[in-house]
Image: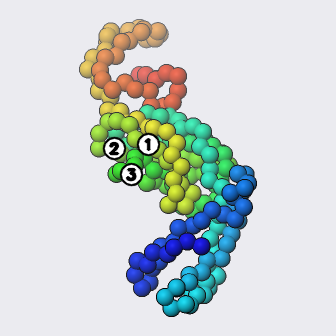
């Protein structure tokens, strides 16, 4: 049992102890327990009314791709890992810690989920975490927000219709956000 913090006459906060047996079995996958509340001052035990709490192993996160995106947000992030990455209504990604932004995550496979990076106030790095319950977070790694690119010039500006001209484009903010080995140029 754990000490309950009474918030109001309609709310109590309880911190879960470790799942029975988890202390001796690091590979424990968890299970469920019935929750009830006991009041020491009144000597009464509140009926659980079927309240159940599920213990389950936390996911293990392995990679994040891409790890760079634009300040304006919208980059689709792919998170891979193992453990419990599916079947949860509260599956979500968290960008940042102190002023965190939480976005929903979508299950792509039992080991892969995706989420869309929210907009940031400024360029820089943030920690990325994943939660299967909206309360406990497994932090993966950092994600870097980069400025939006600007193009200032290109040389040459003319070439043959058969293509093949190497064009040098100059500007700022050219960061590979697609997670590929190179960026792409689109003509037309």
Q: Quadrant of residue 35?
A: bottom right
User: Which quadrant of the view contains residue 45?
Assistant: bottom right
Earlier sequence position, callout 2 versus callout 3: 3
Q: Considering only order in the chain, which callout, 1 or 2, is on the residue closer to the N terminus?
A: 2
Looking at the image, residue 184 lies above or below residue 146: above
**Mark 2 or 1, closer to the camera:** 1
Q: Residue at x 57, y 87 (%)?
A: 46
Closest to the observer, 167 or 105: 105
Label 2, label 1: how far apart the Cα atoms are: 13 Å
Q: Which of 48 and 170 is in front in this view?
A: 48
- The residue nearer to you, when weighing 79 against 61, is 61
Closer-to-camera residue (19/148) = 19
Q: How crowded is mark 1: few (under 14 residues within 10 Å), some or many (20 or more)?
A: some
Screen quadrant of the C terminus = top left
Q: Is residue 149 visible?
A: yes
Query: Mark 3 packing: few (<14 Cα in 10 Å), some, or many (20+)?
Result: some
Residue 22, image x and y in percent?
Answer: 69, 58
Residues under numbered marks 1 and 3 in contact, where contact means CB atoms less than 8 Å apart? no
User: What mark, if any, has residue 127 been given in the picture?
Assistant: 1
Q: Position of residue 81 (x, y in %)?
A: 63, 43
Q: Position of residue 32 (x, y in %)?
A: 68, 69
Task: Please determine whether, in this image, residue 28 is positioned above or below residue 37.
Answer: above
Label 3 secondary element: loop
- Residue shown at 43%/22% (left/top)? 185
Q: Distance between the residues labelled 2 and 3?
A: 10 Å
Inspect this view and state whether residue 188 appears: no
Q: Name the residue under label 2.
A: 120
Identify residue for label 3: 100
Horizontal and vertical percent position of residue 12: 47, 77
Residue drawn where x is 39% and y is 52% of the image:
101
Q: Which residue is drawn at 59% across and 73% down?
A: 1
Tag 2's secondary structure?
loop
């Amino acid at each position: 049992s754990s000490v309950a913090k009474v918030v109001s006459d309609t709310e109590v906060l309880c911190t879960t102890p470790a799942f029975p047996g988890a202390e001796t079995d690091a590979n424990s996958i968890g299970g469920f327990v019935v929750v009830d509340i006991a009041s020491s001052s009144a000597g009464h035990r509140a009926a659980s009314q079927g309240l159940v709490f599920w213990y389950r192993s936390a996911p293990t996160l392995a990679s994040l791709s891409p790890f760079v995106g634009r300040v304006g947000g919208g980059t689709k992030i792919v998170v891979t890992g193992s453990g419990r990455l599916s079947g949860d209504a509260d599956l979500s990604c968290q960008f940042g810690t102190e002023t965190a932004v939480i976005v929903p995550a979508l299950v792509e496979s039992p080991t892969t989920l995706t989420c869309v990076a929210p907009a940031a106030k400024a360029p820089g790095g943030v920690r990325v975490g994943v939660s299967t319950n909206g309360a406990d977070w497994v932090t993966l790694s950092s994600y870097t927000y980069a400025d939006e690119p600007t193009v200032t010039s290109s040389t040459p500006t003319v070439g043959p219709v058969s293509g093949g001209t190497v064009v040098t484009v100059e500007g700022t903010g050219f960061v590979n956000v697609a997670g590929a080995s190179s960026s792409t140029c689109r003509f037309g």
